[in-house]
Amino acid sequence: QVQLVESGGGSVHPGGSLRLSCAASGNSFSFYSMGWYRQVPGKQRELVAEISSSSITNYADSVKGRFTISRDNAKNTVYLEMNSLKPEDTAVYYCRAIGYRSTTYLYWGQGTQVTVSS
C-alpha cells in the first residue's frame, strides 16, 4: 500500500512559478512510475507529466518547456517545477503512482489546488 501526499499548491500571478511535491509512504518507491495529472471542474483528468522508474520523462504538449518533473528515490518524493504559469494551468493537481508486477498497482493523492490569476 502506498499513500501519496501532495503539497506546494497555491495562488500565483501569470508568469509566476510553483513547485509541487508528492511524498510517498511505504516501500519500493523506485518501483513505481510517477505522474502529475490535473483536473478542472467539468473536464476529465489529464496527464501533465510523468517519470518512469528509470527516470524517462513525458510531458503534455501544453506544458513542454515550462514544467519539469523529477524524482528523488532517496526521499520517496516526486516534484513538479512549474514556470511561466498561465491562467489555463489553474486546476487541482494530483499525484499518481503506478507499477506492474503480476498485477497493476495504482495510487492517487488527494490533490492540491493551483490557481493562476492576476
Image (cartoon, rainbow, N blue to C red):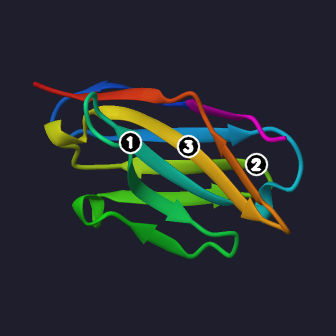
Question: In what quadrant of the picture does the N terminus appear?
Answer: top right
Amino acid on which the number 3 mark rests in the picture: Cys
Residue type (three-letter) at the residue carrying disc 1: Arg
Is label 2 in a helix, a strand or a loop?
loop
Q: Which mark is residue 38?
A: 1
Whole-Å distance between the Cαs marked 2 and 3? Answer: 13 Å
Does the image show residue 15?
A: no
Query: Which comes before the other along the chain, label 1 or label 3?
Result: 1
Which residue is at 67% across, 57% downward? 98
Q: Is residue 68 magenta?
A: no
Going 23% across and 44% down the picture, which residue do you hit?
85
**Front residue of 108 and 16:** 108
**Label 3 crowding class (10 Å Cα cut-off): few <14, some 14-19, many 20+?**
many
Residue 28, which numbered label? none
**Distance Cα–Cα, label 2 vs label 1:** 21 Å
Q: Which residue extends farthest right?
A: 27
* Number of numbered markers: 3
Q: On the rendered image, what quadrant is the C terminus found in?
A: top left
Occupied quadrant, residue 56:
bottom right
The numbered disc on residue 95 is: 3
Q: Nearer the viewer, residue 82 or 103?
A: 103
Q: Which mark is residue 76?
A: 2
